[in-house]
Image (cartoon, helix red, strand yellow):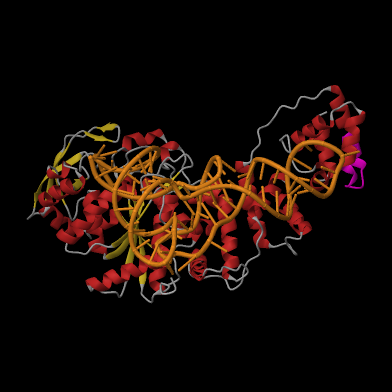
Amino acid sequence: MSEAETIGKGTWIDKLAFELLEREKSIGRNLELIRVESGLGASGVPHIGSLGDAVRAYGVKLALENFGYKSELIAYSDDLDGLRKIPEGFPESLQEHIAKPVSLIPDPFGCHESYGMHMSSILLDGLDKVGIKYEFRRAIDTYKQGLLKDQIHTILQNSSKIGDKISELVGQDKFQKYLPYFPVCANCSKLYTAESTEYLSDEKKVIYNCHDAEIGSNMVKGCGHHGEANISKDLGKLAWKVEFAARWAAFDIRFEAYGKDIMDSVKVNDWVADEILNYPHPHHVKYEMFLDKGGKKISKSLGNVITAQKWLEFGDPKSILLLLYKRITGARELGFEDIPSLMAEYNELEDIYFGKIKVDNQAKLTKSKGLYEYVNLLNPPKESSIHVNYRLLIELSKIFKEDRTQRVMKKLLDYGVLKNPQPEIEKMIELAGNYADEFDQQEKIEIGLDDSAKKALGLLSTALDAQEEPEDIQNTIYQIAKSNDVQPREFFKILYQIILGTTRGPKIGPFITDIGRKKVAKTISEYI
RNA sequence: GGGUCUAUGGCGCAGCCAGGUAGCGCACCGGACUUUUAAUCCGGUUGUCGAGGGUCCGAAUCCCUCUAGACCCGCCA
């Protein structure tokens, strides 16, 4: 292993960028600017998997720059994609727009120029929040400006050859019959219903026929329109099986990652790029989908979508970057409950980076340091930040619901975790607090109190209002219970239920002091 | 039909992509603290790394075969 030379920063990202460069060199392509691309869906709510595609592509861009090359990330929004299904939480009124390109559908929330831009913006906002820089491009502009017209022309001229190859490679026969180009019907604005059967090469026009089509489980009515569409002017789009290839060639893309769900499309597109468009396909890496904790694919309809925005309520941007950069292989089940360990892992990496934790294995040390640098987008801080255990913050946040930041901070000072209050820790407390509120809600239990219990609570409440020494509280509680014919065990349980909503908790004497005796006295009095 | 991933102590997982004494959490056992429960702290037990073969001085890690499970594709994007 000592012979193995460290590539770049020693992570999979470096290895990938290195392979990419080797391949480009062997092809003999110009390396002045190496473009990497990430495709963004614009028809559904963008979840963390979509974000991952772009974040990882950006990682490759960073690695290329680190090797001394100029690189650029293109974030391409496929907003000519047709709306197939109304996402959960979106108005039913979208029904009338089914099958239309998402960039031609009005934004149901009225905040963006179209449905498509609304969706894209959510993803772009996520990218901005984690610090990813990109050049944004849209399908609708790309087609309107005719940027793909040469590629479309070549593809349509070779459509029967392509149709046969698609059948051979992935067993899909439809393109042996239809052209891999969907015009937007000039009459009803729908995509997919317009099936094109013939390409008039000289005029650069396809002839189509708008008929009923099955999209997902829905039947979409065609309007019966017969028309012609000019591939460089009229709206329409290539089928996915060939569209990437056209884009790669037109934009000169050298790298694009893809999820395993589109593996077949990539296989076909690679062939189309190489053999039809005479553009050596970009280097790829395949990644697994993020699944939810039950092993189900994350999808809008199941309501298990994890968006960057939601994640960032609980974890900082670095936790997202760490999740996405730590590895790319392997299927992964993901949930918000992963945030605490990612937060802790980041701190650990930082300690390794700054030499506070010793790592014997040289290769692993390099890799950990490299990972830390990528999580900081290759711009790591000069000195270590102050670490506070995120789980501890969650525990403290569960206890303190009011004046949380202030009280949790005070506890941290008491514990000696911090010497002085820190503004960045305040932010962490806020995140941990959100997490505690969202995921640690205790079931509200009806507390059954008999007369003797009520009497005991009354005495305790009074005692707490006057009591001076915190050390005595535990004892006082015990005494009150005993002298009022209440089982201490029961009495403690009742107190936990009143204060925490659970039947168990931390040692209650000091705990009451932490919350504030007077406050607890008041809370208890409300139950009498 | 095609493809991908996963398999590691009782449970949940990390480590695998660049081979070098098998780790973490929970659970469990013991101790400390506590005039109840719980919590907390300290210490400890637990594994022929799915099966079989190969490469290597050395394999959880790389290669091949097999078994089981999950997921994706075979509408569309």
Left or right of residue A36: residue A198: left
Image x and y of residue A317, in percent: 53, 58
Left/right placement of residue A352 relative to residue A301 reads: right
Please indicate whether residue A388 sits to the left or right of residue A260 in the image. right
Q: Main secondary structure of the magenta part?
A: helix
Q: Image quarter for residue A173?
A: top left
Closest to the observer, A494 or A132: A494
Measured from the top left, where is residue A8 in percent x and y? 42, 72
| Magenta stretch bounds | A459-473
Q: Is residue A133 visible?
A: no
Residue A357 pos. (x, y %):
61, 67
Quadrant where the image shows the C terminus of chain A: top right
Which one is nearer the viewer's eye here, A258 or A83?
Answer: A258
Q: Quadrant of residue A27?
A: bottom left
Is A302 above or below relative to A412? above
Seen as rendered, the residue at the extreme bottom is A68
Residue reaching furthest to the top: A451
Does A173 sit above or below residue A202? above
Q: Does residue A218 appear anywhere in the picture?
A: yes
Q: Residue at x 57, y 68 (%)?
A: A359
Is-magenta flag for residue A238?
Answer: no
Q: Position of residue A321 (x, y in %)?
A: 49, 59
Question: Residue visible at 22% across and 45% down?
Answer: A184
Relative height, residue A321 to residue A449 (above, below): below
State the residue at coordinates (66%, 64%).
Answer: A386
Q: Quadrant of the N terminus of chain A?
A: bottom left
Query: Residue B36 versus residue A137: which sits nearer the camera?
Result: B36
Q: How many marks?
A: 0
